[in-house]
Every structure is written in structure tokens, then in C-alpha cells.
Image: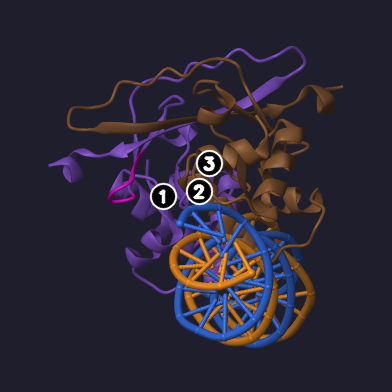
Chain colours: A purple, B brown, C blue, D orange
Amino acid sequence: MDTFSILRTHNLRRTACREGILKVIMTSGKALSESEIRSNLSGNFDRTTFYRSFKTMEDSGILHKIVVDDRMIRYGLSESVTGKSSHPHFYCTSCHSVFCLEDSLVAPQLPAGYSSQNLEMIVKGVCKKCNA
Amino acid sequence: MDTFSILRTHNLRRTACREGILKVIMTSGKALSESEIRSNLSGNFDRTTFYRSFKTMEDSGILHKIVVDDRMIRYGLSESVTGKSSHPHFYCTSCHSVFCLEDSLVAPQLPAGYSSQNLEMIVKGVCKKCNA
DNA sequence: TTTGTATTTGCAATCATGTTGCAAAAATAG
DNA sequence: CTATTTTTGCAACATGATTGCAAATACAAA
């Protein structure tokens, strides 16, 4: 799906910043941080605009956050856009990249009274490239 | 185990800040953020001292970080101290508390060439108290 | 195509979180 | 008690993120 259709089906206006962000993420096939996205983006946008674009697209369900403990928030395309189901992520402690894993996630048993909205799993380790 | 023994068995000096942090976490039975810990702590320590205490105790394997997407790092007692095995955490999106879940974690299959060091799972939802 | 309205942008200011160097203070070993 | 090593607190700094507001832009409707 192209960036234009993604924005349109989520009732968002088409702006250069949003389209640029989506294009960079889609091309990379990974979840990226704000700084990674900015350095791969043609055109110069204010940080504020970036943060607001992320928030808007997250709220609309286009992007989802991935947080690893290096305190850098990364954004990836959400399941409704990729068509994939919920899956674990792999964080390479050497090159700091985040990849999607293919397995599906199994929800743990919750105590009585608790309700679940969402499931996140991060596997930390070293990726193929860094292991070589 | 008391705070004194914990520090001693990990070859750390016994300081008021470290003992205070441990005591607050142990009493709460949850993973807490720096600000939560500070507000429950008698005695006033510089922010720097706090951060250094966390880092020292994390490096020694007494504490471990838990990161949820509100960008607040929480610290809980690590498995070597509690005797528990690796387990998922529950994050309440209403009261922002973090609880430990009892299930054990199952590692997903990794692609060839990838190696795993560590596994984290966060279930987001609403806890018993907030559901009531 | 032009115009009107609602949304989005960029800027400046501000806040929160976290880190570093360094001298003074405290903890431990002997 | 003293010497040595570690830890603390302060100031300065870095980074990530948010807010208010006026100017610019996107889009729908004429």
C-alpha cells in the first residue's frame, strides 16, 4: 500500500512529513527511531513536527511504538497496515537495530480481575550481521 | 533477605541511598520508577546519586530495568535476589503500575545466525484495582 | 479555479530525564 | 584510628519531548 492510501484510509491529511516518515519506515522494513528516520529523509522538518506526526499516526493506528531500554522510541508499521499479526521483536545489542520475528505471541495467564489490551515481547541478543 | 546482606553478597558498600532504594522496592513488591522511589524514601539524595545507585545495583545484578512505553524506567529486584525465574510483567495503563506475572517465558524461535541474551515481555491492560 | 475553514507547521520557550568531571565526604580494611 | 577506596553532591551539560501561538498548508465546497 502506498503512503497516500495509508493516510487516506486512516482519515489523515497528506503532508510531506507524514509521507516521508512512512516511506522511510516502509523502505527499511524495520522499526526506526526519530533520528534514524530524520537522517534518511529528504527534506527538513522541525523536531516538533516529527513528534506530532508520530503521535498522530500512532493515535490513528498507522504506527506503533517499540521501546527497548536504550530509551530510544522506535516506530514501526502497525499490524492493521502490514497485515501481519502480533509478533515479538528482536533488539540487537551490538548495532541497536530492531527486527520483527515471525513467531506469534502467546499471552500469559492473567490473575483474576486483570484485563489485557496488548502484548509486547522483546528478545535481546546479537543479530546475524553482528555475529558474523 | 535484608538490604545489608543483599549489598554485601554483591560486593557493594552499604550506603543510605542504596539501602533506602532497596527497602522501598522490597516493601512495595512492585517495580518502581526513580520518582516513585524518591517520594517513598526518607532522606534526600541528589538525582545523580540516585541514578548512580541504580546503575551500580543493576550492574551488580541486584536490580533489573523494566521499560514500558511511557518512557519511565522502572527497577525491580532481579531474579538472583528474589529467587524467582524470568517472568512477564503487567503494565496497568490506568494507574501505571507494573506487576510481575507468574508464568514463565517461552523464547521464540530465532532465525539462523541470531543469538539471544535476554527476554522481556510486557502485557498491557488494566489491573484488578482499576477494573473494580 | 478560487475561496473559506480546519489542520498542520515552525519557532521559541520550557520541562523531564539522564550523564560527566571534580572536590568533599563517607565506608571499609588494616 | 588511620589510610585508601568508593561514594556523594554540585554545577554544567546533553537529549528527548511538549506547549502556545502565529503563519502556512491541505482540502472541500462553491
Chain of the residue that carries numbered disc 2 in the rendered image: A
Residue D9 % position (x, y): 69, 72
Q: Are marks 2 and 3 in contact (CB under 8 Å)?
A: yes
Q: Nearer the viewer, residue C21 or A7?
A: C21
Kindly identify the amino acid type of the residue bearing the numbered disc 1. Thr
> Distance between the Cα atoms at labels 2 and 1?
6 Å
- Type of the residue with mark 3: Thr
Distance Cα–Cα, label 2 vs label 3: 6 Å
- Point out residue B53 in the picture as x, y percentages from the top left corner: 59, 54
Residue at image point 72% right, 30% down:
B29
Return the residue at label 1. A3
Dot 2 falls on a residue whose secondary structure is helix
- Residue at 80% x, 52% y is B39
Mark nearer the N terminus (1 vs 3): 1
Task: Name the residue beneath numbered marker 3.
Answer: A9
Write the start and end of the magenta stretch as one range. Answer: A91-96
Residue at coordinates 34% horizontally, 33% vertically from top-left? B117
- Whether discs 1 and 3 lie on one chain: the answer is yes
Question: In the drawing, does residue A92 fall left or right of residue C18?
Answer: left
Chain letter behind tag 1: A
In the image, A19: left or right of A10?
A: left
Residue corresponding to mark 2: A7
Q: Against B98, is A109 above or below? A: above
